[in-house]
Every structure is written in structure tokens, then in C-alpha cells.
């Protein structure tokens, strides 16, 4: 198994890429849907984070952790073998939702543009 790596960008490094920063700040649901789609999930999955708390509170169940954001963050971390823990993912998802989506967006963007190296050997006959 390859060694664990760090996130490509820091949680609060949104000013490193102003285009993505503005995209996430002015339209957080849009960047969330883009992250979901880029990770191979349903584009509308993050809408659960918007509608979920309202529906759950209507039934008297408090919900403070965004379930879709948390699930995507954990999925991205496991798929790309990024250092962290479930506790850190929960804390991060609760503290700054916009920063979490920006960080996931930057990670997927970085992974998409980083080419994979393939070593091909000629077949012996």
C-alpha cells in the first residue's frame, strides 16, 4: 500500500486559487455538486446537506454534521490515501463547510491533472 499523503491544499488556503475560491464562496452549492460529480457520485448528493437538517429537525432530530459532505470527504481521503481520521473529518465538516468543499475541489482538481506513470515492458516471446 502506498504511503499516506497530505491534502494537496490546506483547509484555509482558498486564496491560492482565486477562481475556485470565488466559485466556492459565491456559490457553495455549485462547487459541492461539482465535487460530487467529479468524484463519481450523483451531482445532487450535496443537496442532502441543504435539505436534510430542515427535514430532520421537523421530526425533532437535530443534525449538525453534513452527511453528504462528510461521506465525500471520507471517500476522497480513503481513495487517495490521504492522512487523517474520521474524527478530523467530522470536525472539519462542521467547522467550515465552505473550506471543506474548497479543499475537496482542489484535491480532485489536482488528482485529475496529475498524470499516472505507467511502466510498460516488452513482452518476451
Image (spheres, rainbow, N blue to C red):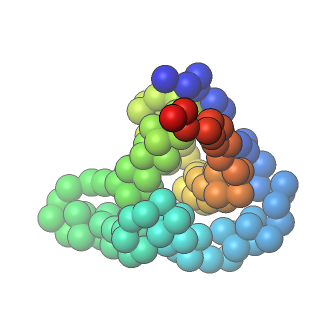
Instruction: Give whichever of 74, 3 is nearer the camera.
Output: 3
Residue 60 appears left or right of 6: left
Which quadrant of the structure image shows residue 121?
top right
Instruction: Give whichever of 33, 58 is nearer the camera.
Output: 33
Q: Can residue 50 be seen from the camera position used here?
A: no
Q: Could you tell me residue 109's position as x and y percent? A: 67, 59
Q: Residue at x 31, y 54 (%)?
A: 63
Q: Could you tell me residue 91's position as x and y percent? A: 49, 38
Which quadrant of the structure image shows residue 2?
top right
Q: Could you tell me residue 75's position as x and y percent? A: 42, 46
Q: Residue at x 64, y 51 (%)?
A: 111
Numbered-mark total: 0
Q: Residue at x 74, y 67 (%)?
A: 20
Residue 22 appears left or right of 63: right
Check the image and report above or below for 95 versus 69.
Answer: above
Check the image and report above or below for 49 versus 106.
Answer: below
Q: Can residue 93 be seen from the camera position used here?
A: yes
Q: Residue furthest front?
A: 125
Residue 25 appears left or right of 75: right
Which quadrant of the structure image shows residue 57?
bottom left
Q: Residue at x 37, y 71 (%)?
A: 42
Q: Could you tell me residue 90's position as x and y percent? A: 44, 40
Amino acid at each position: 500500500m502506498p504511503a499516506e499523503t497530505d491534502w494537496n491544499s490546506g483547509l484555509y488556503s482558498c486564496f491560492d486559487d482565486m477562481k475556485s475560491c470565488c466559485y466556492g464562496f459565491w456559490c457553495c452549492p455549485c462547487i459541492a455538486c461539482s465535487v460530487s460529480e467529479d468524484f463519481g457520485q450523483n451531482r445532487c448528493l450535496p443537496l442532502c446537506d441543504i435539505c436534510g437538517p430542515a427535514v430532520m429537525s421537523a421530526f425533532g432530530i437535530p443534525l449538525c454534521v453534513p452527511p453528504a459532505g462528510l461521506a465525500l470527504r471520507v471517500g476522497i481521503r480513503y481513495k487517495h490515501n490521504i492522512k487523517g481520521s474520521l474524527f478530523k473529518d467530522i470536525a472539519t465538516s462542521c467547522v467550515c463547510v465552505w473550506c471543506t468543499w474548497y479543499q475537496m475541489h482542489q484535491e480532485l482538481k489536482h488528482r485529475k491533472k496529475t498524470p499516472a506513470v505507467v511502466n510498460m515492458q516488452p513482452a518476451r516471446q
